[in-house]
Image (cartoon, grey):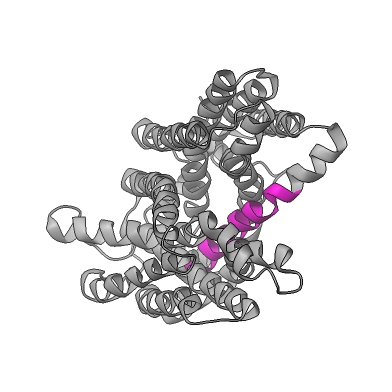
C-alpha cells in the first residue's frame, strides 16, 4: 500500500529531533508523564465545568443575556485557543518551548481559579478567555516538545499516547466536575490549581531542546528548511479542521441522538459516552501499534469514521446507535494522531513551534464550529441523525479523494499530501 514507508522528505524531517535525550529509565518516564499531563490541561478546561452550567445559569439568572452568556464560559477557551495558537507557535520558536510552557502552566492556574473570587459574569467569561490563551501555549509547547524529543516510531507512539490520555481524561474530568459541582458551582474551579504542581516539575525534569548542527553529509539542509512549508502544512490544516469536526461529533451530540431515540436515563447516556471514549483510546493504541505512515492510513481511517456515522444515521434503537458511535470513535482515535504525525513530518526543528501552533489552531477551530455546522445541516435535512449521516458521507468522499489523488501522484511523492488539498 502506498505510504507504508515514509518518503525521503518526511524521513529527513523525522530525523530533525534535535537533542539526544534519554529514552528509558525514571527520568524518561517522568518527562513523558509531564508532557501527557500538560496535554490534558486544555481538555480539563473544555469539559470540567460542563456539569455545573445549569447551576451557574441559576446563579446568574438575573443578568441580562445570561442564557447565552453562561455557555460561553465553557466554549470561549476553545475559541481563544484556536485564534491564538498560531501566535503561540511563533513565540515558541522565538523564545523557546520549555520557558513558555512553564510560564503558561502557572498562568493557567491563575486564570483558571479566577471564578472562585469573581462575582461578575463578564469577568468570569474574560478569565475563561485567558484560560484559552494559556491553553494555546501549553498545547503548542507540549506537542512541539514531543516532536523535538522523539523521531520516527517513538514520535508516533507518544503522539498516539497524547490522544489516548486526552480522550480518557475527558471522561475523568467530566465525572470529577460533576462530583465537585455537587458542593457548589464554584468548587470545580479549584481543580485548575493542579497546574501549579506541574510547573516546578516541568522546570526541573524537561530537557531544553536545541537544534542539531547540520552534518557534513547534508550541507544543503539548512537552505532547504529555511522557507516555512506553508503549502504542505496548509493541506494538513485543512484536513485537521475537517477531522476535528468528525472527532467531536460523538462527544458533543451523543446525548441528543440518544434522546431522540427515547433514551432519557442519564446513567445509560453516561455509559454510552464512556464506551465511545474507550473506543477512541483503542483506536489510538491501534494506530501506535500499526507503525504505518500516517498519510497512507488517512483514507482508511476516514472511511472507518464514515462507516460509523452511517450506522448511527440508520440506527433505529440505542444499541445500534452506540455500535455506530464505537466504530466511529475507533476511527477518530486513529485520525487525530495520524493528522498530527503527518503534520510533524513536514516540519524542521526551526519551524516546529509555528507549525504546531497552526495545526492546533485548525483543530480547535474545527472543535468550535462542529456543533454550529451540525446545527446548520440539521436544519437543512430535518434531523440530527441526518446531519450525522451527511458528515459521514463527506468523510467517505474525502477518503475517496485522498486515495484517488495518492494513486495519481508519482511514487516519489507518495508520502506528501495531495496537491488538491495542499
In-front residue for pair 237/279: 279
Residue closer to the observer: 113 or 86: 113
Q: Is residue 245 above or below residue 202?
A: above
Is residue 220 visible to the viewer in this orientation of the structure?
A: no
User: What is the span of residues highlighted in magenta in the rendered image?
Assistant: 353-372
- Give residue 243's position: percent from left, percent from top: 61, 43
Residue 355 colored in magenta in the image: yes
Q: Residue at x 59, y 54 (%)?
A: 363
Picture coordinates of residue 47 (x, y %)? Answer: 50, 55
Residue at the farthest left position = 25
Along the horizontal axis of the image, is 377 left or right of 10? right
**Residue displayed at 25% across by 76% down:** 200
Q: Residue at x 85, y 40 (%)?
A: 379
Residue at the outermost right position? 380
- Residue 394 seen in the current view: yes
Res 400 → quadrant = top right
Q: Position of residue 245 (x, y in %)?
A: 64, 45
Residue 212 rendering spot, x and y as whole percentages: 33, 68
The residue sitting at 50% across, 49% down in the picture is 340
Decide: is 402 above or below 92: above
Amino acid at each position: 500500500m502506498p505510504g507504508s514507508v515514509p518518503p525521503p522528505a518526511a524521513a529527513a524531517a523525522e530525523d530533525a529531533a534535535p537533542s539526544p535525550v534519554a529514552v528509558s529509565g525514571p527520568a524518561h518516564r517522568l518527562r513523558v508523564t509531564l508532557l501527557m499531563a500538560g496535554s490534558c490541561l486544555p481538555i480539563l478546561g473544555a469539559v470540567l465545568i460542563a456539569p455545573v452550567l445549569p447551576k451557574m445559569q441559576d446563579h446568574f439568572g438575573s443578568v441580562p443575556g445570561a442564557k447565552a452568556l453562561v455557555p460561553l464560559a465553557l466554549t470561549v477557551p476553545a475559541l481563544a485557543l484556536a485564534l491564538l495558537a498560531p501566535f503561540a507557535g511563533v513565540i515558541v520558536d522565538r523564545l523557546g518551548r520549555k520557558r513558555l510552557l512553564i510560564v503558561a502552566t502557572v498562568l493557567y492556574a491563575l486564570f483558571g481559579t479566577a471564578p472562585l473570587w469573581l462575582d461578575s459574569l463578564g469577568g468570569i467569561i474574560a478569565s475563561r478567555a485567558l484560560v484559552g490563551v494559556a491553553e494555546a501555549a501549553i498545547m503548542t509547547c507540549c506537542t512541539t516538545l514531543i516532536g523535538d524529543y522523539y523521531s520516527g516510531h517513538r514520535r508516533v507512539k507518544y503522539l498516539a499516547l497524547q490522544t489516548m490520555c486526552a480522550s480518557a481524561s475527558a471522561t475523568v474530568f467530566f465525572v470529577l466536575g460533576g462530583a465537585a459541582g455537587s458542593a457548589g458551582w464554584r468548587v470545580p474551579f479549584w481543580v485548575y490549581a493542579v497546574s501549579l504542581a506541574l510547573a516546578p516539575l516541568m522546570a526541573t525534569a524537561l530537557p531544553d531542546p536545541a537544534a542539531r548542527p547540520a552534518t557534513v553529509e547534508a550541507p544543503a539542509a539548512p537552505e532547504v528548511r529555511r522557507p516555512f512549508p506553508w503549502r504542505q502544512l496548509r493541506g494538513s490544516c485543512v484536513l485537521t479542521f475537517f477531522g476535528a469536526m468528525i472527532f467531536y461529533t460523538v462527544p458533543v451530540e451523543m446525548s441528543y441522538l440518544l434522546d431522540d431515540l427515547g433514551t432519557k436515563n442519564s446513567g445509560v447516556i453516561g455509559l454510552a459516552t464512556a464506551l465511545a471514549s474507550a473506543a477512541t483510546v483503542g483506536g489510538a493504541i491501534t494506530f501506535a501499534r500499526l507503525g504505518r505512515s500516517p498519510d497512507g492510513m488517512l483514507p482508511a481511517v476516514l472511511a472507518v469514521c464514515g462507516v460509523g456515522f452511517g450506522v448511527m444515521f440508520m440506527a433505529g434503537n440505542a444499541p445500534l446507535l452506540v455500535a455506530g458511535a464505537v466504530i466511529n470513535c475507533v476511527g477518530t482515535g486513529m485520525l487525530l494522531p495520524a493528522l498530527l504525525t503527518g503534520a510533524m513530518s513536514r516540519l524542521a526543528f526551526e519551524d516546529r513551534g509555528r507549525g504546531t501552533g497552526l495545526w492546533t489552531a485548525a483543530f480547535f477551530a474545527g472543535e468550535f464550529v462542529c456543533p454550529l455546522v451540525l446545527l446548520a445541516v440539521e436544519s437543512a435535512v430535518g434531523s440530527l441523525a441526518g446531519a450525522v449521516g451527511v458528515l459521514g458521507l463527506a468523510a467517505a468522499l474525502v477518503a475517496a479523494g485522498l486515495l484517488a489523488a495518492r494513486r495519481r501522484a508519482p511514487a516519489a511523492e507518495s508520502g506528501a499530501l495531495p496537491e488538491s488539498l495542499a
